[in-house]
Every structure is written in C-alpha cells, then in structure tokens.
Amino acid sequence: YFKDAWPERWEKFAKANPNKPEDVLVQKLVRELEQSGTLDVLRHGFKLPGVKVETCSFKPDHGMNPDTLRRYQCNRLRVVPEVSYSPHYREGEYNPRLDLVLFVNGIPVATLELKTDHKQNIGDAKHQLMTDRDPAGEPLLGFGTRALVHFAVSNDEVWMTTKLAKAKTYFLPFN
C-alpha cells in the first residue's frame, strides 16, 4: 500500500534504507503498532526520520482531489481464512488457527470464529474465543495493538468483543 499510495515517500524511505527497505518498514510498523496501537497507526500513520508513513487512506468526502481518491483506491482489504497466528507454533503439537482474519493494508483489524448451527453454535464460538484464544504472548490477539475486534459468528448470530480476557471476556451482540 505505502509504495503505491505514496511513491515519493517510499522512494525517500528506500533511499535512506537501501538494504531490504520492505523488511525495515515492516519492523518499524510492528514497533509502532506495539507502542501506539492499531487504531492510532491506521488513523494517523507514524513518523520515521525524514518521512511520514501513512498506513491507510479513508474515503474522501468528494472526488475533487484526484490524489486523495487515488490513495484511497490503493487500500488493500483482505480476508484470509485459516490463519496460523502463534509465534509459539510447534510442528505437530501446537498450531492454533483463526477461521478468518480481516486485514487493511496488511494490518490485522478483525478476527472471526465461525460456527454453523449444524454442529456447533454461537456459544461454542464465544467459548473458543474465551478459552483457546489467550492473548498472552500472541501478538495478533493483543488488546489494542493488533486486531481491534473479535467476532463470534453462527448462522443466525454475531457477537463481538474488543478484548480477549479469558473468562472475563465480555461479548456484545452485533446488530
């Protein structure tokens, strides 16, 4: 996104970081997400020496500024199924997966635990988020620093929480 939406800023950044600028940008982004949080980084971007990094562009009120409209159209929205998210993954032992993760320009903003009413129900989805999705040591699940919302979804219901806190997780119906 950043390369396409802000090519002049990307060139300046890449010139200042000639060895693997993509890797450097990702490292800086991760640090900023941990320090400032996902919402702040999406809304305001972050500053690096000599360049401001914008991480998304919101829809303009009108199309009078073609550059603003072009940057908005550069946004990359992705729905990724079966995401293995744990840095503690061990082959054959521990490999937790999320049913779906929604990304904005590579930044995770929502997770979804999906259940069909044929085998499981909304209660099972909420229970799984409360018991199997411990945010301790799992960056993708960290409150405010990665995914902003976690959904429990069945055929007929959607519930949401913004903070996974094991048994203290509080869900609201999403209407």
Image: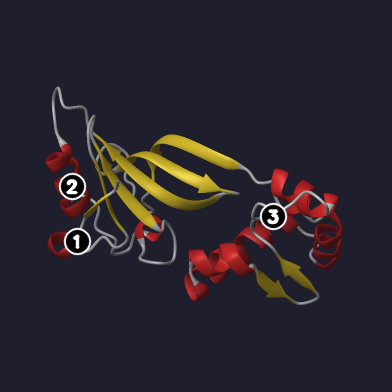
Q: How far across and down, in percent of the image, does residue 70 sit?
A: 78, 47
Give the secondary structure at mark 2. Answer: helix
**Left or right of 145 in this view: 40:** right
Give the secondary structure at mark 3. Answer: loop
Amino acid at dot 2: Lys
Tag 1 residue: 169
Q: Foreground residue, 26 or 165?
A: 165
Q: Are marks 2 and 3 in contact (CB under 8 Å)?
A: no
Q: Residue at x 76, y 77 (%)?
A: 49
Q: Are marks 2 and 1 in contact (CB under 8 Å)?
A: yes
Q: How far across and down, in percent of the image, does residue 14 sit?
A: 81, 60
Tag 2 residue: 126
Q: Are marks 1 and 3 in contact (CB under 8 Å)?
A: no
Tag 3 residue: 61
10 Å neighbourhood of mark 2: few (<14), some, or many (≥20)? many
- Counting residues from the start of the chain, the first of labels 2 and 3 encountered is 3
Q: How far across and down, in percent of the image, does residue 108 sit?
A: 48, 51
Q: Can the viewer see residue 20 in this picture?
A: no
Q: Can the viewer see residue 96 in this picture?
A: yes
Q: Vertically, is 49 above or below 20? A: below
Distance from disc 2 to disc 1, alpha carbons, whole Å, reads: 9 Å
Amino acid at dot 1: Thr
To which quarter of the image does residue 51 belong?
bottom right
Q: Foreground residue, 107 or 27?
A: 107
Q: Residue at x 29, y 48 (%)?
A: 174
- Counting residues from the start of the chain, the first of labels 2 and 1 encountered is 2
